[in-house]
Amino acid sequence: MEAELIRKGLWDMIFVEVDLNEKTNDEVKAELKKLLGKRTAKKMAKARVEIILRVECNQLAHMHDRDPKVIWEMLAQLHRACGLGTRMALRRKLLTAAKGATESMSAWISRVKGMALDLEDIGVTVDDEDRILTLTTGLNKSYDSFVISLDSTATADLTFNHVVNHLLNEDVQQGSVVHEDSEVTGAALVSMTQGHGQGQSQVCYRCGKEGHIQAFCMATLIRGKGVERATVAVDNYAF
């Protein structure tokens, strides 16, 4: 819903941004009140309509106020659980998360960011250290050397974005190594298969030619020849 209001240029009817630099609390409140007073009734009505059209019928009871900002804050209060139980559950979810076996690295990074945002939405401060901790502890053992290398990074440079950039590079490198190993293994298997089936030429006992066996020989059997070969073979085997 927020994206739709932004797309239609109505988000400033709900979220009013005030510059806080070198201003007292009273000055901030005065400027906020001034900006809210500048909102036009027409745009406020449009924003209210957009919200009403995107909620379920059982939520219409909260839509009576004419100020879309008040409606938005009321909906947030109703649907955004922020008690101690919720805070603990979301923290536990963040700290115990792990990257799935088939989950891409970009998807894992996005999931960590999303869990951090869920906490920030209910007023919990999540710093870069928490994000980095979740991001790295959720990796499998193939990334242990990467995690250890972070110890040599200066504390000032050890930001979440820094770790993400290096982790993506590490993921690409590991993917290349796995791909090369797969190609080598595949080539070895093909070579072994070819050597087993094609390295030794088969000789037909009927016609004496190579490339097939007697059961598939199309040559006409010469009288006595087949018997002679069989006898020789048996005699040689017997002695």
Image (tube, rainbow, N blue to C red):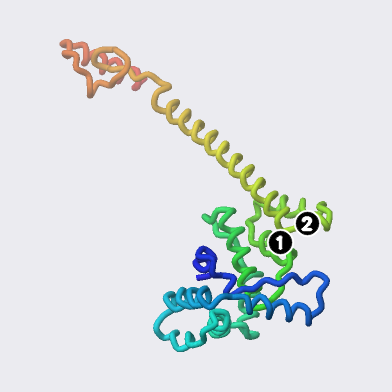
Q: Residues within 10 Å of mark 2 (few under 14, many from 20)?
A: some
Residue 37 in picture, x, y percent from top left: 63, 79
Q: Please determine whether, in this image, residue 139 is positioned above or below residue 39.
A: above
As drawn, is 90 to the left or to the right of 222? right
In the image, residue 105 sits, relative to residue 37, either above or below, namely: above
* Residue 85, quarter of picture: bottom right
In terms of image quadrants, where is residue 80?
bottom right
In-image side of 225 versus 80 (left or right): left
Looking at the picture, which amino acid does disc 1 mark? Ile
| Marks 2 and 1, the one that precedes in the sequence | 1
Percent x, y of residue 144: 70, 53
Q: Which mark is on residue 219?
A: none
Above or below residue 219? Residue 25 is below
Front residue (pair 117, 38): 38
Which residue is at a point 64% across and 61% down the rendered structure image? 138
What residue appears at the point 37 percent right and 18 percent down from the top-left corner?
201
Q: Is residue 86 above or below residue 161?
A: below
- Tell me what residue is drawn at x 44 percent, y 78 percent: 52
Work out whether residue 158 or residue 20 is closer to the camera in this orientation and state it: 20
Question: Residue 98 placed where, x, y %?
Answer: 60, 63
Q: Are marks 2 and 1 in contact (CB under 8 Å)?
A: yes
